[in-house]
Amino acid sequence: MLHNIRRHPRFESGGGGLASTALDYARFLQMALNGGTLDGVRLLSRKTVEFMTSDHLGPIPGIADFTGPGLGFGLGYAVRLQPGMAAFQGSKGNFFWGGLAGTRFFVDPAEQLFAVLMLQAPGQREHYSTLFANLVYGCFDD
C-alpha cells in the first residue's frame, strides 16, 4: 500500500490518494460514456464532456514525450487523436488516464465501451496498462 487511506494526508491534492470502489469508478465512467448522464440524471452538460475530452495542448514541441505518439490531453484525460500511433489499441476519440499505483481506465465512445483496471503495481503500471487495453480490444471478434 502506498499510503493508509484511513489517515489524513499531509498534503491534500485533487488526485493524490483518491480512493474509490470499482462500482463507483464504473458508474463515473458510464456517466462519461453517456456524455454526462447517469441513470437518467444529467450530471455534466454534453458540451462540458466534449470540452474535457478534446485536446487542449495542440502541437507543442515534445508533447509526445508526455502523452505518447498519437495522443493529446484534455481536461483530466489523455485523448487519442488518431488510430495506429499509440502503443495500445483504441479508437480515435477515446480518452483515458491512470493512477500512480496502476489503476487505469479508458472510455471509447466509438465502441460504446469503458473499462477500468484496479491495480496496485506502481513499478509496473505502464506495462500492465498497455496489456490491459490490448486484451480488452483483442476480445472483439469483428
Image: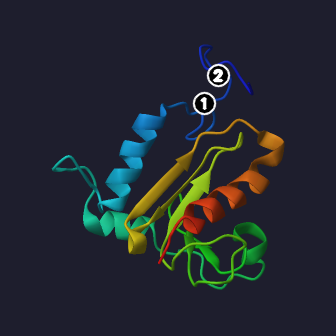
Residue ID for mark 1: 12
In this orientation, which residue lies closer to the viewer: 10 or 17?
A: 17
Question: Which residue is depicted at the point 40% across and 36% down?
Answer: 24
- Callout 2: helix, strand or loop? loop
Q: Is residue 57 above or below residue 123?
A: below
Dot 1 amino acid type: Glu
Total residue callouts: 2
Q: Please tell me whether residue 95 is drawn above or below residue 99 in the rendered image.
A: below
Q: Do labels 2 and 1 touch, CB within 8 Å?
A: yes
Q: Is residue 38 left or right of residue 122?
A: left
Residue 17 locus on image (x, y percent): 62, 32
Q: Residue reaching furthest top?
A: 7
Residue 137 relative to residue 48: left or right: right
Q: Quadrant of the N terminus?
A: top right
Horizontally, residue 44 falls left or right of residue 4, namely left
**Residue at 75% over, 83% down:** 61
Q: Residue furthest right?
A: 123
- Are there few (<14), some (14-19), or many (20+) residues within 10 Å of tag 2? few
Q: Position of residue 30 (x, y in %)?
A: 35, 52
Question: Measured from the top left, where is residue 75 in percent x and y?
Answer: 50, 62
Name above or below for residue 17 compared with residue 131.
above
For the point 37% across and 66% down, which residue is it? 112
Can residue 61 be seen in this snapshot?
A: yes
Mark 2 highlights which residue?
9
Depth check: give the residue in front, 12 or 39: 39
Q: Does residue 78 appear anywhere in the picture? A: no
Mark 1 Cα within 10 Å, few/some/many (few <14, many 20+)?
Answer: few
Q: Label 2 amino acid? A: Pro
Q: Position of residue 90 (x, y in %)?
A: 56, 72
Q: Is residue 132 above or below residue 52?
A: above
Give the Cα distance between marks 2 and 1.
Answer: 6 Å
Q: Is residue 43 left or right of residue 111?
A: left
